[in-house]
Image: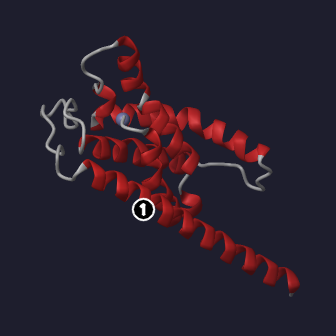
């Protein structure tokens, strides 16, 4: 885990950079999907919460599922929202899901002692303790604010260009 929503902060920055080449919805779905693992362990009362899904290899598998399920699901939602072009390519779906699950493993790895991100190549967690937990949360929050602002600015600029070209 920690809190899945914190992972959405960096996602907003990825969206601001990637634009229509990045699906925030598939990215978000991949965060929920990968955190089903600790959720199930928590419910069962297991001592170890983070297993194979929270390794780079396992997260690759989670990304495949997130892309395959997320692509039609996101297209459906976009259509319902009235988007003119609701189609999402496989590359966009795959990259968004993989950026989602791998960034998740990195961020979680910084704070969770029970993770083995490099399994099966190595055990242990070399990422643990590289940053303070508070710093990480603040950085994720800042990413969310900056990313959302950049997305809004970009949308406003696009809207202006549309209006100007419509007036010609
Ligand atoms: Zn997690």
**In the picture provided, is 128 more to the left or to the right than 33?**
left
- What quarter of the picture does the N terminus occupy? top left
Against 21, is 87 above or below? Answer: above
User: What element does badge 1 sit on?
Assistant: helix
User: From this viewpoint, which residue is outermost toward the top?
Assistant: 44
Q: Position of residue 62 (x, y in %)?
A: 42, 32
* Mark 1 sits near ligand 1, with its Cβ under 8 Å away: no
* Quadrant including the C terminus: bottom right
Q: Most extreme residue toward the front, as rendered? A: 134
Left or right, 46 with respect to 94, comes to left
- Given residues 69 and 149, the one toward you in this image is 149
**Residue reaching furthest to the right:** 167
Whole-percent x, y for residue 143 in the image: 43, 61
- The residue shown at (54%, 43%) is 26
* Residue occupying the point 17% across, 43% down: 128
- Quadrant housing residue 34: top left
For residue 39, which quarter of the picture?
A: top left
| Residue at the spot 48% in from the left edge and 66% down from the top edge | 146
Point 80% across, 51% down: residue: 82
Which quadrant of the picture is home to ligand 1? top left
Residue matched to label 1: 142
Residue 140 screen position, x and y as percent: 39, 55
Q: Tell me: residue 34, above or below residue 149.
A: above
| Residue 119 x/y as whole percent | 19, 31
Estimate how packed mark 1 is, as few (under 14), some (14 to 19) or many (20 or more) residues with alpha carbons within 10 Å: some
Number of labelled discs?
A: 1
Q: Which of 88 and 3 is in front in this view?
A: 3
């Amino acid at each position: 885990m920690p809190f899945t929503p914190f992972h959405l902060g960096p996602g907003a920055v990825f969206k601001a950079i990637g634009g229509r080449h990045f699906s925030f919805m598939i990215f978000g779905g991949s965060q929920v999907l990968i955190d089903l693992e600790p959720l199930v362990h928590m419910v069962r009362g297991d001592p170890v919460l983070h297993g194979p899904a929270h390794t780079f290899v396992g997260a690759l598998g989670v990304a495949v599922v997130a892309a395959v399920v997320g692509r039609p699901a996101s297209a459906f939602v976009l259509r319902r929202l009235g988007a003119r072009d609701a189609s999402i390519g496989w590359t966009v779906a795959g990259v968004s899901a993989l950026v989602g699950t791998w960034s998740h493993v990195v961020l979680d790895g910084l704070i969770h002692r029970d993770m083995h991100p490099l399994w099966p190549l190595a055990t242990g967690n070399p990422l643990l303790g590289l940053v303070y937990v508070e710093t990480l949360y603040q950085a994720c929050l800042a990413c969310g604010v900056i990313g959302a602002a950049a997305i809004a600015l970009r949308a406003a600029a696009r809207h202006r260009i549309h209006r100007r070209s419509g007036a010609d």
